Image (cartoon, rainbow, N blue to C red):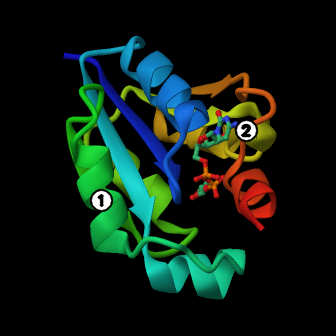
Amino acid sequence: MRRIITYGTFDLLHYGHINLLRRAKALGDYLIVVLSTDEFNWNEKQKKCYFTYEQRKQLLEAIRYVDLVIPEKNWEQKRTDMHEYHIDTFVMGDDWKGKFDFLKEEGVEVVYLPRTPEISTTQIKKDLK
Ligand code: C2G
């Protein structure tokens, strides 16, 4: 049972997120999404989410590729998450390329997948304005 993990805000869920989750799940059998809490988003990523953590969690849990959603509360938890959840592969979009290579030290495979072009939560908000 290959266990995959990925992290993100997933606000205003869109097909770019789905493309990432589908490809992440295809790398194994069980996909854990570590979802940024409202506090983490605001304090660490200066992101004001449209949907609350609970709403974003509910949306993710409805996706066929997602097996478990847990909270991302800080930047530091990744190392322990790899062991706590017995992770084989860590996956992120390639806008993060190289940023999490240190997780290889925890014995996991680190994979950066190409982002889906032309779609982002920021773009959606701009277009709707
Ligand atoms: N993504 C993508 N294509 C897009 C938009 C997003 O592949 N057009 C991917 C991102 O690369 C990321 C995931 O979807 O892997 C979630 O994107 P965000 O919600 O923007 O996540 P981010 O704010 O980058 O949070 O600790 C890591 C952070 O929590 C990552």
The circle on residue 119 is: 2
Q: With 43 as the anchor, is 87 left or right in this view? A: left
Quarter of the image for residue 41 reads bottom right
Residue 108 visible at all? no
Q: Which numbered circle lies on residue 13?
A: none
**Amino acid type of the residue tagged 2 in the rendering:** Ile
Residue at image coords 71%, 81%: 46
Residue 122, located in which quarter of the rendered image? bottom right
Judging depth in this view, the residue of 34 and 2 nearest the camera is 34
Q: Quadrant of the C terminus?
A: bottom right
Whether residue 68 can be seen here: yes
Q: How many marks?
A: 2
Q: Residue 38: image x %, image y %? A: 47, 80
Q: Position of residue 62 (x, y in %)?
A: 22, 41
Rounded to the nearest angstrom, the CA distance separating label 1 from label 2 is 21 Å
Circle 1 residue: 57
Question: In the rendered view, does 81 fall on the left or right side of 41?
Answer: left
